[in-house]
Each structure stands twice: as structure tokens, then as C-alpha cells.
Image (cartoon, helix red, strand yellow):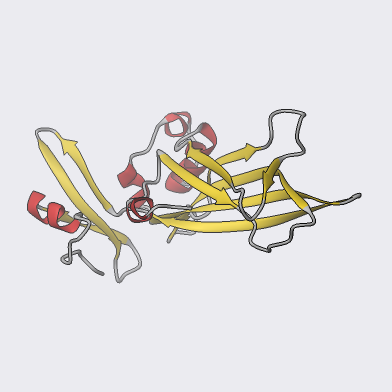
């Protein structure tokens, strides 16, 4: 589950996502346990060579032998946190391949800026989870898996230091199908990024 601030101001790197798994079927004569949750995070881009590059992966399961797994019911939920690495070696090399069309030692080792992702058409993160369940009903035990997928839009506004001045930009997809940006004044940036602003740029 994402809070409203996470939905509006998602960054491509350094993201912490909280999630919750619960039951809503009202069945009381069986017990359900989460055996494992596998979550993959990838980037969504308007450009095919970047779209789908894996950003991070996570597995979570019970860490003792006293329980079958994380117990869930109508009144007992599993709550977890997915802290996205941001720029591990696999992600950097994968993005560098699409970013430059080839690998090189210097490119593969560098860390990219938020603006590098935005100008290459990245507009969201896709977070996909596979939840493995153990279902116990009396003497009968069964196993099944369910899937969950959500996209978190990327915040298209950035600011950065360039020599002795701060640069403000708003990135968007142009009519020619290429990413472009508008340079903003500090006042425009402030107005565009306020929570309750009705003056946001639209394209």
C-alpha cells in the first residue's frame, strides 16, 4: 500500500515501499500462511531499450522453524517494507547498455542521476510480487501463489546545482515522441511542486 506522498513524488532511486497482505474471504475453518514473497522492481520507459530493466529484487519469508510462515486472516495482516536499492551493479549495467547501446568499464561503473533516467523516458517503477501461500484445512495442506503488480509514477520535477546556480526542470514526452524539458524559474518550480497547486504544468 502506497501513501499519497509516495504516489505523487516517486523517485527512481532511493525508494521505500510499504505493503500489506490480508484475507477478505471470511473463511474460518482453514489457516493461511505466507511461505514467501518475491518482489521485483523494474523501470517503465517510453523507450524500448530502457523499458523493463530490473532495478531490484527482494524475498521475504519466516526466519524460524517454529511457524509454517506468516499467518494472515481477516483480522491479522502481513505488513512488510521493500527498500529499493536504487543502483546496484546489475541495474547500472542494464541501464547503461540501453543508455549507450554498449557496455564499457567506465560506463558500467558510474551511477546515474535522476535526470539521466527522466531524459531517457522513465516515467514509472513497476513493482511485481508473487506471494506463495500455504493453506491448512484440517489434515489437508495445499499450496498456491497469487500475483500483485503496481506502477508508481516518477516525479518529473528536478533541481540540481550547476556551478553557482540551481537549475529547475520539468520533464515530459514531446509531441515528436522524444523526452524534453522546460527550464523553470524558482518561483515556477515552487508553484508547480506544491501539494495543493492548481497551476501545475500539463502536457
User: Foreground residue, 143 or 176?
Assistant: 143
> Which quadrant of the figure has residue 71?
top right
Percent x, y of residue 195? 22, 56
Q: Quadrant of residue 161?
A: top left
| Residue 110 located left or right of residue 180 | right
- The quarter of the rendered structure image containing the C terminus is bottom left
Image location (x, y in percent) of residue 37: 65, 44
In the picture shown, does residue 203 fall above or below 52?
below
Judge from the rendering whether residue 9 lies leftward or rightward of residue 72; answer left or right. Answer: left
Query: Residue 121 location, x and y as percent?
Result: 38, 56
- Residue 149 lies left or right of residue 25; in this view the side is left
- Residue in view at x 51 percent, y 37 percent: 93
Left or right: where does residue 172 sit relative to residue 53?
Answer: left
Q: Which is nearer the eye, 164 or 24? A: 24
Is 48 located above or below residue 79 in the figure?
below
Residue at position x 24%, y 47% from top?
A: 158
Q: Residue furthest right?
A: 139
Q: Position of residue 16 (x, y in %)?
A: 44, 41
Amino acid at each position: 500500500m502506497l501513501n499519497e506522498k509516495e504516489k505523487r513524488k516517486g523517485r527512481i532511486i532511493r525508494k521505500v515501499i510499504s505493503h500489506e497482505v490480508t484475507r477478505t474471504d471470511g473463511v474460518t475453518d482453514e489457516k493461511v500462511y505466507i511461505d514467501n514473497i518475491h518482489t521485483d522492481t523494474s523501470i517503465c520507459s517510453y523507450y524500448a531499450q530502457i523499458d523493463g530493466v530490473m532495478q531490484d529484487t527482494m524475498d521475504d519469508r519466516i526466519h524460524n522453524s517454529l511457524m509454517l510462515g506468516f499467518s494472515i486472516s481477516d483480522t491479522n495482516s502481513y505488513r512488510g517494507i521493500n527498500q529499493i536499492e536504487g543502483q546496484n551493479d546489475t541495474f547500472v549495467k542494464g541501464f547503461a547498455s540501453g543508455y549507450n547501446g554498449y557496455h564499457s568499464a567506465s560506463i558500467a561503473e558510474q551511477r546515474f542521476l535522476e535526470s539521466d533516467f527522466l531524459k531517457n523516458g522513465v516515467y514509472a517503477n513497476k513493482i511485481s510480487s508473487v506471494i506463495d501461500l500455504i493453506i491448512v484445512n484440517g489434515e489437508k495442506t495445499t499450496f498456491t501463489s497469487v500475483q500483485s503488480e503496481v506502477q508508481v509514477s516518477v516525479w518529473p520535477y528536478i533541481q540540481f546545482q550547476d556551478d553557482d546556480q540551481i537549475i529547475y526542470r520539468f520533464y515530459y514526452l514531446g509531441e515528436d515522441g522524444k523526452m524534453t524539458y522546460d527550464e523553470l524559474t524558482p518561483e515556477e518550480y515552487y508553484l508547480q511542486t506544491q501539494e495543493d497547486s492548481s497551476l501545475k504544468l500539463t502536457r
